[in-house]
Structures are given as C-alpha cells and as structure tokens.
C-alpha cells in the first residue's frame, strides 16, 4: 500500500544548472562518495545547508567552525573568571553568561534546521581469511 505524499512534499518543480561533462561527472562521483543516492539529492542537501547557515553559498560546516571559535573564546573567558575566583577576586560574569546564551541560541537555531542524514547501509561481505 502506497502512502500519499502531502502536496508540500511532492517535487513537481524543476531547477536546472548547466555543467560541463567533466563537472557533471565530478559532481556525480562526489555525491555518491558522500553517500547520496543521486546528485539531485546532494544538491538539495547543499542548498538546504546554505539556507540553514543563512550564508549565500555558505555551508553548515563553516557555521559550525564559527560557533566553535566563539565557544573557544567563551571557554577562555570562563577559565580566566575561574582563576580570578580562586584568587579571591570579585568577578562579574554577566557578559560571559550572555555570550553563552547567545551562542546556545545560535547553535539551537542551526540544529533545528538540520535534517538527519540518510546513511546508506552497506551489507557486510564475508571475506575468507588467508593464513
């Protein structure tokens, strides 16, 4: 029994991109190497990542690198605050806490936009052991 797709899930529109034969072959190989069933699926994934990262032509990995850099700076600030507390100094940490909240919100926004990757399962192949 087939399950009917909602109208928003039916892909009836088409987007076309011109490519040289070499580009098309490279893109096909890259799509399959990354576990995508088709180049179209890979392109949809790339466009989705660009939309989520809110960067023109950007990708999610660059957004994650940016978040990681900010997290590293916040961690450094926390270490400095902890060191000051251990020395008995008065510490104002509201700015660092606000940075943590802002970073958490950005991370949550990014993660909400991600869809789970479809991983193709590879069937195990039995290989005879050579002695």
Image (cartoon, grey):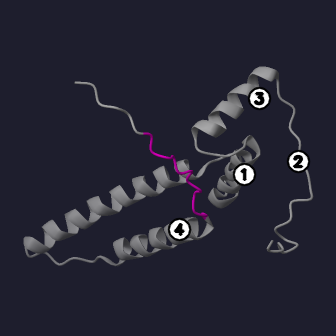
State which mark lies toward you, 4 or 2: 2
Q: Do the CB atoms of the residues marked 3 and 4 lie less than 8 Å apart? A: no
Determine which residue is flagged by label 3.
24
Label 2 – label 1 distance at C-alpha: 12 Å
Residue in the image at 54% along x and 48% along y: 62
Task: Say left or right for 103 vs 47.
Answer: left
Question: In this rendering, is residue 72 above or below 83?
Answer: above
Determine which residue is flagged by label 1.
47
Region of the chain picked out in magenta, as a range: 114-125
Determine the secondary structure under disc 2.
Answer: loop
Q: Position of residue 16 (x, y in %)?
A: 89, 42
Label 4 – label 2 distance at C-alpha: 30 Å
The front one of 106 and 7 is 7
State which mark lies toward you, 4 or 1: 1
Question: Would you say residue 65 sits in the magenta stretch?
Answer: no
Determine the secondary structure under disc 4.
Answer: helix
Label 2 – label 3 distance at C-alpha: 15 Å
Determine which residue is flagged by label 4.
106
Residue in the image at 37% along x and 73% along y: 95
Question: In this rendering, is residue 125 above or below 94?
Answer: above
């Amino acid at each position: 029994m087939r399950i009917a797709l909602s109208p928003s899930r039916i892909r009836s529109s088409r987007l076309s991109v011109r490519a040289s034969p070499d580009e098309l072959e490279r893109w096909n190989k890259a799509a399959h190497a990354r576990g995508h069933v088709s180049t179209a699926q890979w392109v949809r994934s790339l466009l989705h990542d660009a939309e989520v990262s809110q960067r023109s032509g950007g990708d999610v990995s660059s957004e994650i690198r940016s978040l990681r850099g900010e997290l590293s700076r916040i961690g450094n600030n926390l270490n400095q605050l902890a060191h000051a507390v251990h020395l008995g100094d008065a510490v104002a940490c509201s700015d660092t806490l606000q940075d943590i909240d802002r970073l958490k919100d950005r991370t949550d926004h990014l993660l909400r936009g991600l869809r789970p990757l479809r991983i193709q399962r590879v069937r195990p192949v039995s290989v005879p052991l050579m002695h």
